[in-house]
Amino acid sequence: MGEPKRERTKQSSKFYVHPDELARKLVKEMEAHKISHSGQDSVCSRYTLFLCPDDFARLQPRQDEIADRLQRHLGKYARSKKYAAAADFEVALVMDPDLSVGRFGILAERIDPLHSVQGSVRGPVYVEQPDAVPDLEPRPAAQSAAPNSISPSHRTKVIPPAQAAELDLARRTIVLKAGDRVREFNKSRVIVGRARDVDFRVDDPNVSRRHAAIYWDDGRIVVQDLESTNGTMVNGYPVSSTALRPGDVMAVGDCRITVETR
């Protein structure tokens, strides 16, 4: 995710994240996680922006407006490239106390109709506007579904198990093991960190509040570091994002975690 562009304000010597930089970095993440299959490029549809407390407080009064703008910007870019997405684009702004001013993290995820049926989609979902352009003017929510997206009525469609398996949408379980501790998760994304509200909590001062994410991506299990302070290791090497293979050992702080699926 790199070092973001920083803006110096007249009122303060601090450097702040600008929405235009967030838009550029979101597009970069979309390209980084793009998958090609049978001549069609598909991209992630959900993006979580992790902001430091100061940046989050500064942008919070316009949070819905900025999220709407960023979602429309992603939709316009995806249409220009003829990329496919399995759901409407969704951007959420979240505060991460471990981040310093001017730094932010991005988590890109794939959302499929089966997960929507089972309620794993969180946060507001906005429909893209075909003529959307990135600006800061408030715009009303669009009423029609965007191209290459799933309309709300389609989200309640039940997919037969055989078809889900054929499309690689069948629900599988993520199993995390750390010493004698074993946890199973029937969800598409698991957050590891020190905060009390994460899925797999690690009580270690060297672990960030939201340290890493483990999630399904095109049939693979992927671990992604969430701009943690001390980084995430896999088999002794620092990683930003990588697919996990059987026997791989993930380390956050002093905690060693193996990831299995069922």
Image (tube, rainbow, N blue to C red):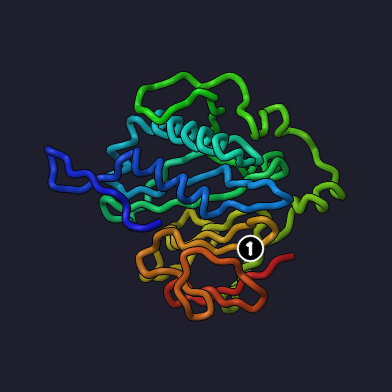
x, y percent for residue 49: 43, 46
Comparing 237 with 131, the one in front is 131
**Residue at horizontal 46 percent and vertical 65 percent from the top:** 240
Residue type pointed to by label 1: Ile
Q: Nearer the viewer, residue 151 or 52?
A: 151
Label 1, secondary structure: give it.
Answer: strand
Q: Position of residue 192 (x, y in %)?
A: 50, 62
Task: Report the residue at 45% width, 70% height from top.
Answer: 232
Which quarter shows the N terminus? bottom left
Quadrant of the image occupied by residue 113: top right
Provide residue 53's location: percent of width, then percent of height: 30, 47
Is disc 1 surrounded by few (<14), some (14 to 19) or many (20+) residues within 10 Å? Answer: many
Residue occupied by mark 1: 221
Say above or below: 111 vs 68. below
Left or right of residue 203, residue 38 in this image: right
Residue 213 coordinates in the image, percent (x, y): 52, 59
Image quarter hosting the C terminus: bottom right
Number of numbered labels in the structure image: 1
> Closest to the observer: 69 or 11?
69
Can residue 253 be seen by looking at this rendering? Answer: yes
Please give left or right for residue 251 compared with residue 188 in the image: left
Task: Tell me which residue sits at (45%, 57%) in the image.
Answer: 196
Q: Is residue 192 visible?
A: no
